[in-house]
Each structure stands twice: as C-alpha cells, then as structure tokens.
C-alpha cells in the first residue's frame, strides 16, 4: 500500500482537513498517477455534505484529476511513465453489460465505480483527487493532449465531458440554436464547446452581471431570467437547452422556450425533485432529458476536441489550505469559473 497526503472531510458537517490516505499497490493493469491539479466540482460539496445520501468518512473528494504517470503495471499497454493523463468521475465498471460494451461505462447496469465515495473492487471506499497520487486501472485513464495545460485540463474531466456529451448526443452544431442555463463551472464549458461546435449559443442567467464574460466565452446572446420579458421574447426559440444549475428552477417555463421537437437536458443535479407540467411537454412535442458524463472513449474524444479548438476551463488555482474557503465561494457563485487545487501544496 502507498500512503499519500490528502485533504478529506471527516464528517458531513466538518471542514476538510489535511490527512493521509492509502492507495493500493500497482497491479498488472494499473497506472500510478502523480496528481498535479484537481478541480473542485459542485458535486464534491453535495457529496461530502451528504446532500445526495450518507457517505463513509473520512472522504477525500475530487474527480477532475490531471497528472503524470509515474508507474505502470506489467500488463499495461495504453499508458507509459511520463504520460500526461487525466481521471474523471469513474474508475471502473463491470465491463460486461450492454452499456459498457457500447462504450457507455457511465451507465453501467451494475453501476460504475465512482472516483470517490464508492465501493472499489477490493471492498474499500474510493478516495478522490484531493491527494498527491492515485492508482487507477488503465482503461479508466485518458490522455491529455499536448496543447492543453494540466491546470486548465483538470476541470474538463467533469465539467467538460458533462457538457460535451449532451451537446454531441443532441447534435449541437451549425444551424442549431442552443441555450445554456447558468454560467458557472459547467455552464462556461457548455458555452465554449457549443460555440466551437458551430451552434448559435444563448446564455440564460439570473442576471446580466456575467454578460461580458459570456460573450467573450462564445455566446451570441445573453438574457437575464429574472426579467419576465425574457420568457415571452424567447418562446419557441431553441433546439436544445442545457440546464447546468444545481438548484430548483421552474422547468416548465424553460420548456416553453423550445421549438417543436426541442429537448431540454438536465446536467445539474439538485437534491430536490424538479416538477414538470405535462402540458409543457405535450404542447410542442418537447422532451425533458438528463445526461451524465460520457464514457471513456467519448471523454478522450472531448479532450482531443478541446485541444483542436484550444479550449480549456477558466480557472482560479488555489493551495490546499483554501479548499474550505473555495467551497463557500462556490456556494456563493463567487468563482470564475472553476477552482483548481495545486496538489503540490499537499506535500
């Protein structure tokens, strides 16, 4: 076993604190990664605070991991020492079900193994990227292309793929009008990626305070949802709406913004249910859908796409000692647009 430095939550109510965690020995198909940067996702906060259910503590979160391979197992063929690599929201799956066989491991019928807070194959609880090293089976490690710095690449392993996947699935591109609800960690990547795909992009945010940012990131239009005229002015406008916020909003009002056969996709995950008026769906043959991250193959595709289009997350790099402060700032929407931990500060 390898003992490494980490930051972990001791309980659902306590601040994250410095600690050490154990990593398994490198097996034949494993890769040991020296983590350089780890993004802070809103999901980390929901998870460690028990919003999505009880957890085992202490728990080191983090599923936006970028680093360097320092050791590989005897049977590893996909990665080599010195490679620039990333790990996202999952570190294993059954590999046998129809979804895994189709490259959709995130929808494994037996449940994928989350990067933290999940039961690993050896029966231990997985620990995430707020640490100096991680051991992951080679099939769940992706290559970070040259041209993307590791710090701006880290958030792509969640925020990037979480938005790329539905944009690709619902065919965002030239001639399509895409709206992004919320301009935060997920939303700013949705804007960048949809723009790079060639879609006409509109940001729907509570206020206009981030309008200048949104337009610089690639949005063509920007509207405040606090203005009641927005919903009447934009009625029937969009082919696709990506809802990135992790709070309850009036879904039925947003559905009215869709064209005939339009789809609204939820990628934000609020703890409470989202009620939908059936008539908001029936009236325009509209769809209300959900989407997770992508599979490993699509995650690599996303990274290659971002490298080709020179896309990375907008980040604020912080030392580990500021993680708890960063959590409060995330909850206050006081970050533009992703906190990234410099894991060298854990040593």
Image (cartoon, helix red, strand yellow):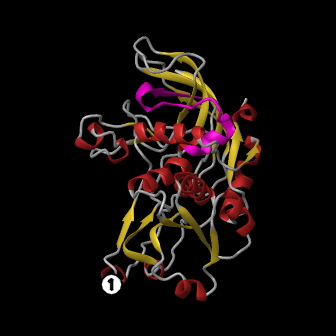
The magenta segment is 133-156
Please report the residue visible at 31 percent of the width from the left and 44 percent of the height from the top: 108
- Is residue 168 within the magenta segment? no
Q: Quadrant of the C terminus?
A: top right
Of 177 and 38, nearer the camera is 177
| Magenta span contains residue 139 | yes
The answer to which image quadrant residue 112 occupies is top left
Q: Quadrant of residue 276?
A: bottom left
- Residue toward you, 112 or 279: 279
Residue 169, compared with residue 39, is above or below; it is: below
Q: Quadrant of residue 221?
A: bottom right
Residue assigned mark 1: 283
Query: Dot 1: few (<14), some (14–19), or many (≥20) neighbours within 10 Å?
Result: few
Which of 23 and 31 lies nearest the eye of the viewer?
Answer: 31
| x, y percent for residue 239 | 43, 69
- Relative depth, front residue between 222 and 96: 222
Q: Position of residue 190 (x, y in %)?
A: 56, 57
Q: Secondary structure at mark 1?
A: loop
Residue 62 seen in the current view: no
- In this picture, residue 106 sits left or right of residue 159: left
């Amino acid at each position: 076993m390898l003992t490494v430095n980490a930051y972990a939550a001791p309980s659902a109510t306590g601040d994250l604190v410095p600690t050490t965690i154990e990593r398994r020995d490198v097996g034949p198909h494993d890769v040991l990664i020296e983590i350089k940067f780890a993004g802070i996702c809103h999901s980390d906060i929901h998870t460690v605070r028990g919003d999505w259910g009880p957890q085992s503590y202490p728990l080191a979160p983090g599923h936006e991991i970028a680093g360097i391979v320092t050791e590989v197992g005897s049977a590893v063929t996909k990665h080599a020492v010195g490679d620039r690599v990333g790990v996202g929201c999952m570190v294993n799956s059954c590999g046998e079900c129809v979804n895994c066989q189709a490259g959709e491991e995130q929808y494994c019928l037996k449940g994928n193994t989350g990067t933290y807070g999940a039961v690993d194959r050896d029966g231990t609880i997985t620990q995430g990227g707020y640490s100096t090293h991680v051991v992951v089976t080679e099939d769940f490690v992706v290559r970070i292309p040259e041209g993307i710095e590791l710090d701006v690449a880290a958030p792509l392993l969640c925020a990037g793929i979480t938005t790329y996947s539905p944009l690709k699935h619902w065919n965002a591109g030239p001639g399509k009008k895409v709206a992004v609800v919320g301009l935060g960690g997920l939303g700013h990547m949705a804007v960048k990626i949809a723009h790079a795909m060639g879609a006409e992009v509109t940001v729907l945010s509570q206020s206009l305070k981030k309008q200048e940012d949104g337009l610089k990131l690639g949005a063509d239009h920007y509207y405040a949802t606090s203005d009641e005229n927005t919903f009447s002015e934009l009625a029937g406008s969009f082919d696709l709406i990506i809802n990135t916020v992790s709070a309850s909003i009036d879904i039925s009002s947003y559905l009215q913004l869709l064209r005939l056969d339009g789809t609204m996709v939820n990628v934000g995950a609020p703890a409470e249910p989202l009620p939908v008026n059936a008539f908001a769906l029936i009236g325009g043959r509209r769809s209300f859908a959900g989407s997770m991250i992508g599979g490993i193959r699509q995650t690599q595709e996303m990274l290659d796409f971002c490298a080709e289009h020179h896309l990375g997350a907008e980040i604020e790099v912080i030392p580990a000692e500021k993680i708890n402060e960063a959590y409060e700032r995330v909850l206050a929407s006081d970050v533009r647009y992703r906190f990234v931990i410099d894991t060298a500060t854990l040593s």
